[in-house]
Image (cartoon, coloured by chain):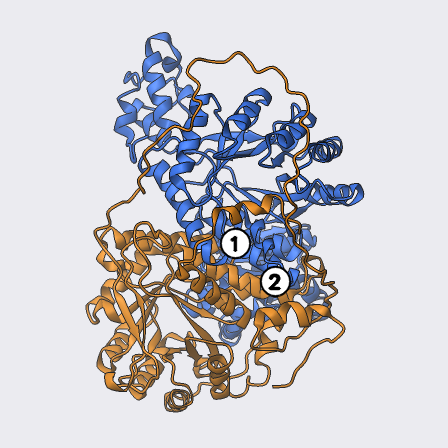
Chain colours: A orange, B blue
Amino acid sequence: MEKKKDSSSPLTDKAIFELLSRFKEIQLEDVDLEIKELELWIQPMARALAPPRRALPPTKPAKPTEILKTEFAPPIRQYSGGVCEVRLGAKKAEGGSRGTSLVIGGEKAPPLHRFEGTMPHEPLVALDVFDMPIPLAAPVKAHFKDVLQDPVAWAKLCVDKFGADMITIHLISTDPSIKNTPAKEAAKLVENILQAVDVPIVIGGSGAPEKDAEILEKTAEVAAGERVMLNSANLDMDFKRVAQAAKKYGQVVLSWTQLDINNQKKLNRELLDILPREQIVIDPTTAALGYGLEYTFSIMERIRLAALLGDQDLQMPLASGTTNSWAAREAWMKTPEWGPRELRGPLWETITSLILFMAGCDFFMMMHPAAVKTLKDTLRALSGGGKAPPDEIAKWVTMKV
Amino acid sequence: MPEKFGPLDIYALLPKTNCGKCAEKSCMAFATRLIERSVTAEQCPPMLEEKHKKSMEKLRDLLRPPIKEMTVGTGERVAKIGGKLVMYRHELTYQNPTAIAVDVTDEMPDDELLKRVKAIESYSFTRIGEDLRLDMIAVRSTSSDPAKFGKTVRIIVENSKMPLILCSFEPNVLEAGLVEAKGRRPLIYAAKKDNWKEVADLALMYSCPVAVFAPNDLQLLQSIASTMMRYGVEDLVLDPGTSVETGLMDTLDNFTMARQAAFVKGDRALGFPIVGVPLAVWSKKEDPPEITAWSEACLASMLLTRYADVLIIHALEPWTLLPIITLRQNIYTDPRKPTAVEAGLKTYGQVDENSPVLMTSNFSLTFYTVANDIESNKINCYLIVVDTEGLSIQSAVAGRKLTAEKVAEAIKKTGIEGKVKHKKIVIPQFAARLRGDLEDMSGWEVLVGPQDSSGIPQFLQQYWQKKA
């Protein structure tokens, strides 16, 4: 891939390079930042004379002179339910051809409540691949401009270079109002992608309800036994056809509704008539930071709590189309007073993902490599179990920045 | 407070006369509204009478926020923190948005200090009609020299109305600052295991709230807080310690445990606002500042979501502040706010028969964004708000909630055809695929507008004038 960088900007080399570490190109516009040497040293504690004290107010009786002994026990609650485990991708021994087979879900306590139970599986990240060139935000396009015409190369780039656990192939050209690519052709592309990368994959439709049922059925067939995720089954289409295909060919279905917990329950119940819970993942719709993220956050939090309290309609892992964060103008718009969009954009996607992770999300469909890296680094750090010594924690008060 | 109490628990304490003086039909209705926090106990006149004194005390105790509410600072920029009534956002609107403090040090040159203070004080970003600002200045004593600290606090107090957090573990340094900030009610940071008594004395002498610091040790945090309460200090703030990277799990666990102890177990010593310190990321000296600022924004966002009532940060970069304050605005909105606004025809400015006709969805966030772009650019136009069942344009098109039929129907129903003499409608780019069918069904010419409503002014200038 061609390196395109503005050598006059120190930001290119020092900042984003560090962040992206392994992938070293980025497009920069209108960036004029200086890297200042970050200095930090801890000044030895200097004791100086205190100003004269005032008289204390009259003392009340029985003031303690020592720290009182109190009893503390972690405030643990009991959860009668739990989230099922969903396996994505099948290896040879399991009837597929994937190099990895990954599991999400399995929680028995709320997210990041380690005192009540640990998260059994680290959430996964799938990077988006499209079957035809589409308009992308400039900070995203910078990373994919050479592969926009070639979804197979695009998929390989995501896996080999950007560390994607999985990829999503979005078959948007199948939309009758776009290119109306026939199911057979779409299925061929899916086969090619399955040959090019050995990670588990997600197969996405175009959003045209009638055509999607056909596309997902056909592609589920050519990917038989691979345990792909079909994105999606929803209430506006013949979701039973998608669920039947998943059942017949051993795939997983993404149950997608739009910010409505009652609809989510309704759709899940319908799908549960056809499929076991272990073949369903919930997507309640991701709205971007600043554009309804709080709705997604609260719906995910409610779904997860309901699952833990025993609601069997909602005891599946949660997924997010985090790429939607790029719909926020704060992410992509070239507005110098908001700071460089090369940093602002991926940070917007990163924070959207982190917040939904805290609500219980298990599966992220994302776009920008730096956002993926930050999320994965954070997940790794959180499961690392390292301890910070108390003295270290206190140092911020006196440190030099 | 018990974990859950219902209207019946409240009703039992009310006069049960259904006198109607509170404007509710019955005491039971009043009890329900008390639970929803849409009225206060004082709005029941009989309860203020002597004979109900005991019940009133019980009622106030029952309704007391599990997380104590307090103020930091005075005057127009006073910050209210804590006062949380629920643990989860979906239960009821979170009270008192997380106060964001930015640091300065007592070793900064005066001009640099003043410049930073002014930058913090004047920072403002307007989003969906709300002015989003920073709330406090955290003065760190990096010198540990009382004279330097006192002078720094004096300069800030003389030049700014911002609430302060005075940061040092040395009581004599803290006192030098407190003398200069007299009457300004700064937050004292912090009392810990080996200085708690001296710091508690300062808090009492200067009538200030005080933070308790017990890194990675909730037992100790609870013990010191209990001791300080017994000592007579009423307004405490808790710092369970903010660790970065591999220690982050401890931090999140501690924040969550402290909050859950207050809500589930009714633990009063842990029923205080929590302070998080994303600034701690700056201890990693090997990274370039952009990377550290990025990490700080991520950590601030996580702690803001996980119960922090106060955050102390360092970076004043627009690209890191923007997501943090936007997230705060999001998290602190009313969870019951519907996602849909009323569909129909809206008019903006002075419209006439030549005015442009635009179209959008009735998803509240889409609608307000579009309306804001129209209003702030002073565009005279009609806007047809189509009922997409509260979905954004993109989702509604995908989910068949926004179809050519629906738009054609909206054109008919709104009566726009009688208001303008042209037959041209601008639709969002995400709805571009409706164009052909819509033209056939409505007989209107369909212009595909910009993807984002910020492009409306330019679009109209370029295409509407020419075509109209």
Note whether B317 is above or below B116 in the view shown.
below
Q: Position of residue A255 (x, y in %)?
A: 32, 67
Q: Nearer the viewer, residue A177 or A191?
A: A191
x 74%, y 76%: residue? A7
**Residue B341 visible in the shown view:** no
Q: Nearer the viewer, residue A56 or B26?
A: A56
User: 10 Å neighbourhood of mark 2: few (<14), some, or many (≥20)?
Assistant: many
Tag of residue B291: 2
Q: Position of residue B126 (x, y in %)?
A: 64, 48
Q: Tell me the quadrant of the picture where the N terminus of chain A can be found.
A: bottom right
Find disc 1 in the rendering and name its residue: B299
Note whether A306 is above or below A137 in the view shown.
above
Question: Number of labelled discs?
Answer: 2
Mark positioned earlier in the residue sequence (2 or 1): 2
Question: Left or right: B259 with respect to B315?
Answer: left
Mark 2 secondary-structure assignment: helix
**Residue A94 visible in the shown view:** yes
Which residue extends farthest left? A273
- Tell me which corner region of the image, top left, top right, bottom left or bottom right, holds residue B4: top left
Mark 1 secondary-structure assignment: helix
Note whether A304 is above or below B151 in the view shown.
below
Q: Position of residue A284 (x, y in %)?
A: 37, 61
> Can marks 2 and 1 be said to lie on one chain?
yes
Note whether A139 is above or below B367 in the view shown.
below
Q: Chain of mark 1?
A: B
Residue type, label 2: Ile
User: 10 Å neighbourhood of mark 1: few (<14), some, or many (≥20)?
Assistant: many
Residue type, label 1: Leu
x 51%, y 75%: residue? B433
Question: Left or right: B284 with respect to B269?
Answer: right
x 35%, y 68%: residue? A236
